[in-house]
Image (spheres, rainbow, N blue to C red):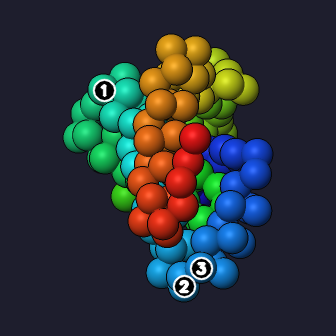
Amino acid sequence: MAATVTLTVAGLVEFSRALDGLDRSLPKALRLALNTSADVVIGKAQPRVPTLTGRAARSMRPRSTRNAVRITAGGDDAPHYPWLDFGGHVGHHGTAARAFLKEGRYLYPSYYELRRSGEFDKVLERELRKVAAQAGLAVS
């Protein structure tokens, strides 16, 4: 099971539809722009993940759609990642215990820090402006 974080940007669906009407390749450019903003969060979260083999940290991947920024972690590469980030009880009869934190330890706190500092918003705005410029749109 992979852990997934989804972020929603107001007006992104409308922006995506408008781009689709201009050029069929632009929605893909939009998805790649959203992946770039997800990479910033991954870059901040990865060093925080405890490492034995490093698989859990390396399992973080941007998986955005043209309407949402997504980060997945865990999966077949590191099925223990959700336990590392959120905690709980696992193993035979739940013998491996870690305090459960609804907000997580790595991904969400990294995202919240980047939002507070404004860095995430700057990267996202820069990337969306690039897509708009590629479409020939002027952005004020």
Image disc number at residue 24:
2
Q: Earlier in the sequence, mark 3 or mark 1?
A: 3
If you read the primary sequence from the N terminus, does the residue marked by circle 2 or circle 1 appear first? 2
- 131 or 27: nearer the eye? 131
Q: What residue is at 55 percent from the left and 72 percent from the top?
A: 27
Residue 89 visible at all: yes
Q: Which one is in front in this view, the residue at disc 3 or the one at disc 1?
A: 3
Q: Dot 3, how many residues are within 10 Å of its Cα: few (below 14), some (14-19), or many (20+)?
A: few
Pointer 2: residues within 10 angstroms few (<14), some, or many (20+)? few
27 with respect to 43 (left or right): right
In the displayed structure, does residue 63 sit left or right of residue 77?
A: right
How far apart are labels 3 and 1 at the CA level?
A: 40 Å
Q: CA distance from mark 3 to mark 2?
A: 7 Å
Q: Nearer the viewer, mark 2 or mark 1?
A: 2
Image point 63% across, 18% down: which residue? 99
Residue drawn 61% across and 71% down?
Answer: 19
Residue 105 found in image quarter: top right
Q: Is residue 34 visible?
A: no
Amino acid of disc 2: Arg
Q: Nearer the viewer, residue 64 or 19?
A: 19
Q: Residue 60's x, y, as percent?
A: 41, 48
Pick the front one: 98 or 75:
75
Q: Which residue: 49% across, 69% down?
A: 135
Q: Compute the Cα span from label 2 to label 1.
A: 37 Å
For label 1, the residue is 47
**Image coords of residue 2 (percent x, y):** 56, 55
